[in-house]
Amino acid sequence: MLTPIRTAFLLSVFALIATASFRAQEPQVSPDPWWKHAVIYEVYPRSFQDSNGDGIGDINGIASRLDYLKELGIDAIWITPMYPSPQVDFGYDIANYEAIDPQYGTMADFDHLMAEAKKRNIRVIMDWVPNHTSDQNQWFLESRSSRTNPKRDWYIWRDGKGQGKPPNNWQSWFGHSAWTYDQKTGQWYYHYFYVQQPDLNWRNPEVRKAMYDVLRFWLDKGAAGFRMDAVSRLFEDPTLHDDPILPGRNAFGDPNIQHKYTDDLPEVHDVLREIRKLVDGYPGSPVLISEADEPTIQDLVKMYGPNNNEIQLPMDFKVADLNKLSAPDFRRLLDEIEFNFANGQPYFFFSNHDQARTWDRYGDGVHNDQIAKLLATLLLTTHATPQMYYGEEIGMRTTVPTRIEDVKDPVGRTGWPKDKGRDGERTPMQWDNSKDAGFSNALKTWLPVPPSAAQYNVATERYDPNSIFNFYKHLIALRREVSALRDGSYVTINRDDANVLAYLRRAKNGTDPVLVALNMSAQAQTVNFSLEGFGVGGKQLHVLLASPQSANSDLPLTGVKLEPFGVLVAAVE
Ligand code: GLC
């Protein structure tokens, strides 16, 4: 008789062979909210698919690729901002929170996308940018028009310390002073990010109301939740203390500074609780995901709220940015998270639109494809909800501009050449090996398609059983179908191994154990798995997925050979 795990394995092999065909995947019935077991995929709309030949991706382009996302096994997409914007920060400078930028389409296109996504059981998560607006937002235009305008206090306006001197030493994350002088009204406004991104004043109840109305607007349109931008920066010290200066200078040439009086103020949590209450009033368990690059695990834990009443999925930047393959370091981080989160659900990712892609950030220059598979396994087989970034599933790499005149991201222009900005991780999605990788038929795309697209693209990889794409697809199917991987418990094993990170997942009733082993070294390793003390009776391993592929489908628990950066996912039977 087939055990559930073997059945899942056969299904997954079928998925691997039938890579080109569409396979409907119904959600599992589970008492848990959907986001605990979802695979979430970040879409950068500008770079995903251009449908109208202007060299910039758009909403209809995303809709045309939903079948692809379904084939891959994605449950929800987070779309970075596509609201009207002067695009200084490529959408993170919002001029109107309740509309669609014509560059990306219309509200009717958005509604169509929602309807098509729903048909495929793919949820849509919106990006919500509460810390700042564009300086072209009507709210700011009114605020800056006079000192007595009713919206003056919607932003942070202060007097300077004298001729040409800002109110204090606070610095923008994107370089130089966080204060800009406004000639007309003779005061300075505060901006944690670009000059064109003035910070909202979250101490003003009218601001809160307006921003909560934005949440309601998109929830009413069927949004499944929000990725909340830069929430830890919502409040600043009202007494304007200077921030402590640290040794050295940053890429922008400014003194290093500790953002002590502008980050992580306790007031943030009152807002998070209000927002959680708001979304909890909607059906369908909407999710809140926060950008939380918190300095310590204790700070990250706080984002969940004292009674899990704040953010359900705070992003864990500690895991994302370890930036080296180290079994002891990952073991420590995963354990730290497991033992600190009470009932909170961890949320892992490795890539996003703000940092170099993992293919090169973790690659060693020799085994990059194999390392991409290893990281995929780590992302998709722990207890955490995984978030992918478009193109990681095909091994897209970071393609940094080589000349300052080509740089689009202002961070790269201010920081050149020390910080070349974020264009490198935002290049167009690579669909096939036609011109511009099937992204667009424009003469020029907004960022260039790198030469590596000829080899690393969906069409080519779909038919290669050893491709990164098929590896991801297989893993996602396993995660969905094997209960231990989907919602089981997690415990690390072989804890003293300096090279191999290994852990055990077990289904909710403690059965059907699955072992995951990741060789984080460039040398082959022979491993003996010691499962005593874990209450696991199995005597051998049945391979569910291995890379490089395993010659045997069954392996003993001792003397298991893992190739350099080799990966093994196996049922213990
Ligand atoms: C977040 C976004 C980033 C943006 C910044 C300012 O960090 O991810 O892309 O530049 O906020 O809005």
Image: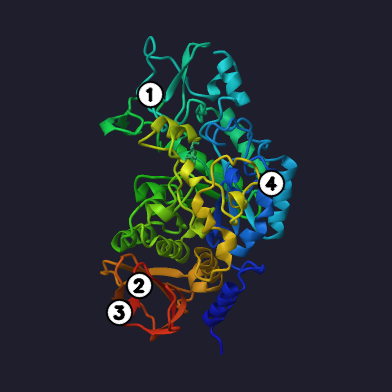
Observer-side mark, 4 or 3, equals 4
The residue carrying mark 2 has its beta carbon less than 8 Å from ligand 1 = no
Task: Give the side of residue 570 with respect to residue 150, left or right.
Answer: left
Spatial CA distance of label 2 from label 4 is 43 Å
Spatial CA distance of label 1 from label 3 is 58 Å
Q: Secondary structure at mark 2?
A: loop
- Tag 4: amino acid: Ser
Q: Are marks 2 and 4 in contact (CB under 8 Å)?
A: no
The reply to whether residue 397 is in sight is: yes
Spatial CA distance of label 1 from label 2 is 56 Å
- Tag 3: amino acid: Asn
Observer-side mark, 4 or 1, equals 4
Spatial CA distance of label 4 from label 1 is 48 Å
Near mark 1 (Cα within 10 A), the count class, few <14, some 14-19 or many ≥20, is some
- Say whether disc 4 or disc 3 marks the residue closer to the N-terminus: 4
Q: Are marks 3 and 2 in contact (CB under 8 Å)?
A: no
Question: Residue at label 1?
Answer: 240
Question: Residue at label 3?
Answer: 528
Question: Residue at label 4?
Answer: 51
- Numbered label attached to residue 563: 2
